[in-house]
Amino acid sequence: MTRIVASPLARRLAKEAGIDLATVPGSGPRGRIVRRDLDKAKAAPPTPVAIPKAVPPPAPVPPAADFGTPFTEQPNSMMRKTIARRLLEAKQTIPHFYLTVDCRIDRLLDLRQQFNGRAGADYKLTVNDFVVRAVALALKKVPNANATWTEEAVRRYDRVDVSVAVATPNGLITPVIRNADAKGLAALSAEIKALSARAKDGKLMPEDYQGGGFTISNLGMYGVKEFSAIVNPPQSCILAVGAGEKRPVVDGNALAIATVMTCTLSVDHRSVDGAVGADFLAAFKGFVEDPLSMML
């Protein structure tokens, strides 16, 4: 910054007159600003100030119809608005991190076929039924993943309640399987089917979908290979399950073909650390790849 040289009197007069000394040329020794320079500055006509033209606000983006694109509007239901608000809140306020594993499910598929082919069986097991069972047992084995964040404490649940995402005409809803770790595959399958049917018919009661410590979102039946889900608050974890598909794998030192299912765990880092998430996925993968261990 250039130092302005001015006499004390000139400084006082400039302050009283509201004159910026940087705009006053000095006529004293070495360009020093003196009283006569202030007198000339006060006598000079004021420099006109250019007033910038007001910038008009940007024009609003016209609706799609104004571009010639036809459309229809479906009013948002209260359920859809609630889902949108909770998802936005979750994505903006929860520090997500993601862990992914590939599970070989050939043995699971063989066991499923054996169960479904039993004479007199009154059930039809799905891969998702095995996934729910594996998640429930993994949560029992790694209870620190069955948690909720609060500002005062991390709340770890003593009961394993698993929410299962169900797509309905009004949006996604997550009915809860209570005490999922204490139920066998046939019982889980029947309860999941009953809750899903009631969800699609809009007949769920609040106690059917409130609570739960962990959510499963399975898009494998739609052919989705892999995806990451948004944590379902106040829960800390949600498992995104992709489709089982034939892929090349390394078996020992040889190349082989196996049915592989990719699963991604989305985690709230405030309440579940990376090591806990990894332990949970390892336990889950173990049950899925050795499905007979889920029968013990």
Image: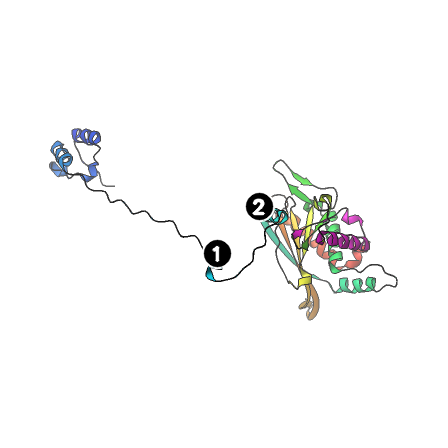
In screen coordinates, is 46 left or right of 161?
left
Tag 2 or tag 1, which sits nearer the N-term?
1
Residue 6: x and y in percent read 17, 34
Q: Which element type, helix, strand or loop, lies under badge 2?
A: helix
Query: Pointer 2: residues within 10 angstroms few (<14), some, or many (20+)?
Result: few
Q: Of the residues shown, which amino acid type is indicated by label 2? A: Glu
- Reading the image, the residue beneath label 1 is 63
Is 176 one of the magenta-colored residues?
Answer: yes
Magenta stretch, main secondary structure class = helix
The range drawn in magenta is 171-200
- In x, y percent, where is residue 7? 16, 31
Three-letter amino acid code at the position of disc 1? Pro
Q: Position of residue 189 (x, y in %)?
A: 78, 55
Disc 1 is placed on an element classified as loop
Q: Is residue 86 magenta?
A: no
Q: Residue at x 77, y 49 (%)?
A: 181
Q: Residue furthest right?
A: 120
Where is the N terminus found, in terms of image quarters?
top left
Give the camera-side residue of 80 and 176: 80
CA gap, disc 1 and disc 2: 27 Å
207 vs 116: above or below = above
**Residue bearing mark 2:** 89
Q: Position of residue 9 (x, y in %)?
A: 16, 28
Q: Is residue 5 placed above or below 131 in the rendered structure?
A: above
Tag 1 near tag 2, CB within 8 Å = no
57 relative to 123, above or below: above
Residue 124: numbered disc: none
Q: Residue at x 74, y 54 (%)?
A: 197
